Image: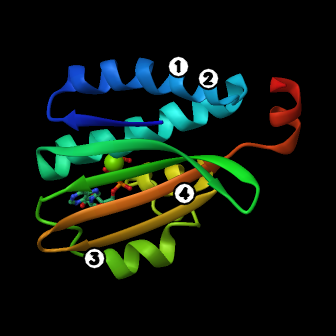
Amino acid sequence: MRKTFQIHFEWDIVYMRSEVREIAKKIGFGEVDQSRIVQSISELARNIIQHAEEGMITVELIEKDGRTGLFINVRDLGPGIPDIDELLRNVHTKTNKEKKGLSHVAMLMDDFRIQSDDTGTAVEVIKWLKKSEIISKK
Ligand SMILES: Nc1ncnc2c1ncn2[C@@H]1O[C@H](COP(=O)(O)OP(=O)(O)OP(=O)(O)O)[C@@H](O)[C@H]1O
Ligand SMILES: [Mg+2]
């Protein structure tokens, strides 16, 4: 399972939110994790619109080492994050109250990776399904 969303306008986020919630539900995520996933893609999509104008988000079911997860790949060709090193130092702490979107995403998801330079920004996040959710799905 794999689906790509083009992000340019606010209503792209509205459409993507409901689609991704359905996908997460089908994979077997509980309501709390569905919300974490939807909240995260919303933050990442808002960053595209606010800071890069347009981009795309791909969600994909992945299996690794016996685990099942939802992989979210976010790409844009915008100006990049100028102070990426400082941002990465602070991303797991909540020191900066103004810019909290990305640290929120890092907190809500299990794996978080970001790369950015003056050719654009790439964010990759994963939410893993808990064993209990896999069992309850069967
Ligand atoms: N896709 C992007 N392209 C370019 N710059 C980005 C992108 N995403 C984030 N940034 C830069 O990184 C900073 C931190 O992003 P973050 O989402 O944490 O905060 P914010 O968008 O400024 O505010 P908030 O998300 O709290 O409303 C932004 O202020 C912006 O300068
Ligand atoms: Mg933001």
State the residue at coordinates (32%, 19%): 14
**Residue 44: percent from left, percent from top:** 36, 46
Mark 1: give few (<14), some (14-19) or many (20+) Cα within 10 Å: some
Viewer-proximal residue among 89 and 69: 69
**Residue 77: percent from left, percent from top:** 12, 59
The residue to which callout 2 is attached is 26
State the residue at coordinates (18%, 41%): 49
Q: Are marks 2 and 1 in contact (CB under 8 Å)?
A: yes
Q: Are marks 2 and 4 in contact (CB under 8 Å)?
A: no
The residue to which callout 3 is attached is 83
Query: Would residue 6 be found to the left or right of residue 21 on screen?
Result: left
The three-letter amino acid code for the residue at tag 1 is Glu
Give whichever of discs 1 and 3 has the lower sequence position: 1
SS for dot 2: helix
Query: Would residue 47 be found to the left or right of residue 66 on screen?
Result: left
Give whichever of discs 3 and 2 has the lower sequence position: 2
SS for dot 1: helix
The three-letter amino acid code for the residue at tag 4 is Ala
**Residue 38: percent from left, percent from top:** 49, 31
> Which quadrant of the rendered structure holds the C terminus?
top right
Question: Alpha carbon of mark 3 to alpha carbon of mark 4: how far?
Answer: 17 Å
Tag of residue 22: 1
Question: Alpha carbon of mark 2 to alpha carbon of mark 4: how far?
Answer: 23 Å
